[in-house]
Image: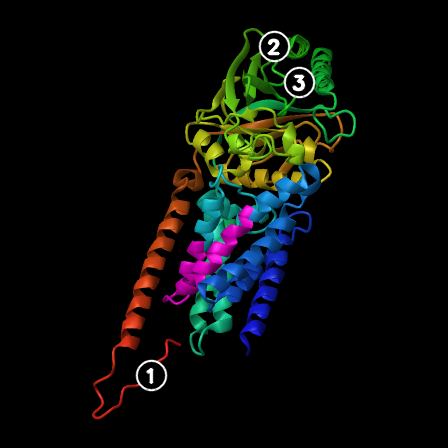
Amino acid sequence: MPRVVVLLVRLGLAVGSGLLLTAAFEPVALPWVLPFAVAGYFLSVRGARPRVGFLVGLAFGVAFYFTHIVWMKDSVGPDAWAGLAGVEALFYGVLGALLPALTRLPLWPLWASAAWTAMEFTRSTWPCSGMPWGRLAYAVADTPVAPSLAYVGATGVTFGLALLGALLTWLLVAPRGRHLLGVAGIAVVLGGIAAAAVRPWQADETGHLRVAAVQGDVPGPGNDILYDHHQVTRNHADATLDLAAQVRAGTQERPDLVVWPENSTATDPFRDGADNAAITGAVQAVGVPVLVGAMVDGDETHVLNQGIVWDPVTGAGERYTKRHPVPFGEYIPFRGLIDGWNFGRLAIIGRDMVAGTGKEPLTVAGARIADAICFDVAYDDVLDQQVSRGAQLVTVQTSNATFIFTHQVEQQFAITRLRAIETGRYVVVASTNGLTGVIAPDGSVVAKAEPRTRSVLDEQVGLVNALTPAVRIGPWLGRGAAAVTLVGLVLAALGGRRRRRVVATPRHDAPDAPDQEMSLT
């Protein structure tokens, strides 16, 4: 078959598989296609030369990532969408260049799956803190695979799904008589998934907390938090005042904690008198601590995105600062090199958001709480580090108003549900106008507010001290996958050198045999 035709077949398979992977996530949400999409990717690059593998892998990455985060195009801007999706697509291209070498190794599905896992692990942390959106594990919230998250975490689940895809590829390309090994491998993976589903991780609750999550709503078009940011603060204050009135009337039990979302005040509440008065009045009226989402001034060129524990007696206290600000969304990397350029909506980012470094949970109402702000929930290190240090409950403060008319909101809520399973904790989500919800440790949704409404969810949640195996493992599975991939590449390189030496060495074992031209293929 002509090389051009082979290349076109590879590219077609890669693009189709990338689009199939998109269908695993919201809004289509067909998670059963995951291993088939990965199998298509492995098949499209198998046996290719590195340059061809890169091109084919890149085609897969473009097809997948540009469609997976298409919500960025209209909500943030086509420039940011193209830039971010383009960078993430490159990772699939690099993987495509490396996989042909790994697939020459014995038991290559293990090596290939480790490489896929290492690729996701790397792109979720680098560059500029990475972009975890689109990891295989983030599509399994409503599947039998979900309980496995408590045991092996998102990284382990990704490896298992990638391995299923690689084993399916093995069944298609393995020589006759070796298919049994692929069937056995699939049986082992499915057996592990079934075992976790039959015996999901559970822990005794050591206490309870009544938590109210406030969704104040966003005035105007609903997708611009700055349209009337003072009214956003008043909306959340008014909803809390209504809750306080119900408590006084005896129609509502007093909560132990109230959670406001990210950007519930878009100005520094220590400098803005009106917002400060609204927050203080609401907190004192309800009579319990309120976790307020606030933008706090750093200096003339920097700002901090914080969750502040606001006590009715002592005022502002402990704080959590967002660990992973969004590049080109909340800060501009290499600003000094591109200042003065016209970057569309990026021009409104006048000050860079400073990344937080805190790993200790907040102490509120006698409980230890792990906080995450918006995109933080997609990163492995934020909640794991706080839970491993004693957090008994998780709160997620998010705005999402920018994305309220897109499917980003559903994608993020699905990731949040997975974090509940992974950490074995109740998760309370407060959003400005959606999605606000309370999630149980098994990932089920206890309560959820309608988007674009003013709502207060008041639920009693359990406190858990025990650590899931996934939290105990932490980042080591990802690091291990990267190490295994490096070892595999070294072995493949050494094997390639041996094959070249064999090719270059004339045979002397046959008498009077003339020199023979040998082929690497």
Q: Residue furthest bottom?
A: 512
* Disc 2 packing (10 Å; few <14; some 14–19; many ≥20): few
Q: How far apart in space, not on screen, are marks 3 and 1 (Cα)?
A: 87 Å
Residue 359 lies in the magenta stretch: no
Number of disc labels: 3
Instruction: First in sequence, mark 3 or 1: give its number.
Output: 3
Q: Which mark is residue 273?
A: none
Q: Secondary structure at mark 2?
A: loop
158 or 244, which is in the foreground? 158
> Residue 465 at what x, y percent from top left?
45, 30
Residue visible at 51% across and 72% down?
172
Image quadrant in which the N terminus is located: bottom right
Q: Secondary structure at mark 1?
A: loop
Task: Point out the stretch of residues depicted in magenta.
Answer: 87-115
Please name the amino acid that badge 3 sits on. Answer: Glu
168 or 352, which is in the foreground? 352
Residue 481 lies, with reference to residue 410, above or below; the image says below
> Residue 480 at what x, y percent from top left?
37, 48
| Residue 459 placement, left or right of 197 | right
Q: Which residue is mark 3?
A: 253
Q: Which residue is mark 1?
A: 517
Dominant secondary structure (helix, strand or loop) of the stretch shown in magenta: helix
Residue 7 lies, with reference to residue 110, above or below; the image says below
> Residue 194: in sight, yes or no?
no
Q: Which mark is residue 271?
A: 2
Instruction: First in sequence, mark 2 or 3: give its number.
Output: 3
